[in-house]
Image (tube, rainbow, N blue to C red):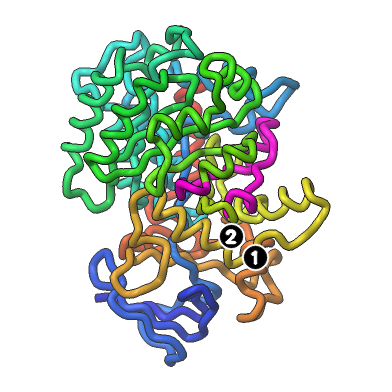
């Protein structure tokens, strides 16, 4: 049993002062408000662990190297493929461990890894065909975060086009072979509380509509999350309409791929009908604003989707930036730029997206809240930094969401285990870990 005392904590959607949180093992057992200090003192605002609902860990090696010159999502993708072609189970593990530790430092305690780098550079399965997935699980555990491993089905290189070049690493040949491999992966982590095995349809570009129900059935069978990249690019919409006479959202709807356990990632270019289908089915929408602006994708109409019925979650996707506070405020600030008006999202709604909603979309419904029975994830943000100083209990959530950065996170307890203390990860200097892991794959 461990007792933490929070100067301020975000509990049940409001800031409370003098909050005692008792933890036994991985879980919170009791929360008391307005009590005198006892146990370990956490100064600042303590919020629940945050969920990064969309990650491609290896993209961390692109940061800085792809922020030069001109181009688009498609030219960026060529640079991403060059790194994808150099990874093996060991370098993938080391890069992911460092990337997940960077996330931990920013207050992220659960990650949704959209994983499609399955096979060796020739497209041949490793001796254990899930070796790359196992690397990600080890990486998350060593960094101290929980992992939703979204095993991605990726069968074609474009509408009607075969996989080419590095893409052959992504493919399983056909959807039933994908399902057989994913079943083995799920069996390997059956009963593991810190790992959730889900699935992903890479996009409507990467598999045909008649193949999708096999992936959907996998997630029903395993009661796991289903994620899919949707309408990130206008070109994807145009090609989808040309191929199937329907938008990507409608294709997914007809394949049975929408619903409360599903998450549409990006949903940047969606029609009124798409919004109605996503919202009406209760499909989550994961936006990744720092990546979407980095790749010149566009701005998602988050409030419209939310009002239609889609819970909004946040992801750092390509890791151009790893900071869920920045993703959260970018949701509101993007709406302001598009509409010319302020005040679409309240700070507490954005913090909900970063915490409990993100966890739910990853298959961890008992995460992202400071409550008895929930995962014991406590993220403490200092309120005396140059960015946050001046905050009071009344303005603490607004100060954190609209002005803090991941560098203001001083303490992280993840699943009852202390992983960040005094702003440092307990395993050591993560900057060096990142430098070495990135150097190994960039040459
Ligand atoms: Zn993505």
- Residue 346 bears which disc, if any? 1
Residue drawn at x 34%, y 35% is 199
Mark 1 and mark 2 in contact (Cβ < 8 Å)?
A: yes
Res 429 visible: no
Give the crowd class for mark 2: few <14, some 14-19, many >=20 residues within 10 Å: many
204 horizontally vs 181: left or right: right
In this view, 226 is above or below 4:
above
Residue tagged by mark 2? 350
In three-dimensional space, the C-alpha distance between marks 2 and 1, rounded to whole angstroms, equals: 6 Å
| 22 over 231 or under it: above or below | below
Write the start and end of the magenta stretch as one range. 279-306
Foreground residue among 245 and 203: 245
Horizontal arrangement in the rendering, residue 340 relative to residue 123 (left or right): right
Q: Is residue 133 visible?
A: yes
Determine whether 172 is above or below 216 in the image: above
Identify the mark at residue 391; answer none if there is no mark: none
**Any magenta on residue 137?**
no
């Amino acid at each position: 049993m461990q007792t933490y005392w929070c100067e301020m904590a975000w509990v049940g959607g409001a800031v409370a002062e003098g909050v005692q949180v008792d933890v036994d093992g991985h879980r919170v057992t009791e929360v008391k408000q307005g009590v005198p200090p006892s146990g370990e003192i956490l100064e600042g605002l303590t919020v629940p662990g945050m969920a990064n609902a969309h990650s491609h860990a290896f993209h961390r090696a692109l940061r800085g190297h792809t922020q030069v010159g001109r181009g688009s999502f498609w030219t960026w993708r060529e640079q991403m493929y060059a790194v994808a072609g150099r990874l093996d189970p060991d370098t993938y593990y080391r890069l992911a461990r460092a990337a997940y530790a960077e996330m931990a430092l920013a207050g992220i305690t659960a990650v949704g890894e959209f994983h499609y780098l399955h096979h060796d550079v020739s497209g041949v399965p490793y001796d254990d065909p899930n070796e790359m997935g196992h690397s990600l699980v080890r990486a998350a555990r060593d960094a101290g975060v929980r992992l939703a491993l979204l095993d991605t089905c990726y069968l074609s290189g474009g509408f009607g086009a075969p996989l080419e070049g590095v893409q052959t690493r992504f493919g399983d040949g056909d959807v039933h072979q994908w399902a057989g491999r994913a079943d083995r992966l799920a069996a390997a982590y059956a009963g593991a509380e810190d790992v959730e095995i889900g699935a992903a349809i890479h996009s409507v570009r990467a598999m045909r509509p008649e193949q999708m129900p096999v992936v959907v059935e996998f997630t029903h069978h395993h009661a796991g999350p289903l994620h899919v990249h949707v309408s990130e690019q206008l070109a994807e919409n145009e090609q989808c309409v040309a191929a199937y006479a329907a938008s990507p959202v409608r294709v997914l709807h007809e394949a049975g791929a929408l619903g409360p356990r599903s998450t549409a990632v990006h949903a940047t270019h969606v029609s009124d009908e798409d919004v109605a289908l996503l919202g009406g089915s209760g499909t989550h929408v994961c936006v990744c604003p720092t990546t979407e602006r980095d790749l010149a994708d566009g701005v998602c109409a988050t409030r419209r989707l939310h009002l239609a019925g889609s819970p909004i979650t946040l992801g750092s996707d390509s890791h151009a930036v790893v900071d869920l506070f920045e993703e959260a405020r970018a949701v509101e600030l993007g709406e302001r730029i598009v509409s010319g008006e302020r005040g679409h999202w309240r700070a507490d709604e954005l913090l909900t997206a970063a915490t409990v909603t993100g966890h739910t979309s990853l298959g961890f419904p008992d995460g992202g809240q400071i409550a008895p029975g929930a995962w014991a994830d406590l993220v403490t943000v200092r309120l005396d930094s140059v960015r946050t100083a001046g905050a009071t209990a009344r303005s603490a959530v607004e100060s954190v969401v609209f002005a803090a950065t991941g560098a203001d996170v001083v303490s992280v307890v993840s699943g009852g285990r202390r992983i960040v203390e005094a702003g440092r990860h307990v395993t050591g200097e993560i900057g060096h870990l990142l430098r070495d892991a990135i150097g190994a794959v960039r040459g």
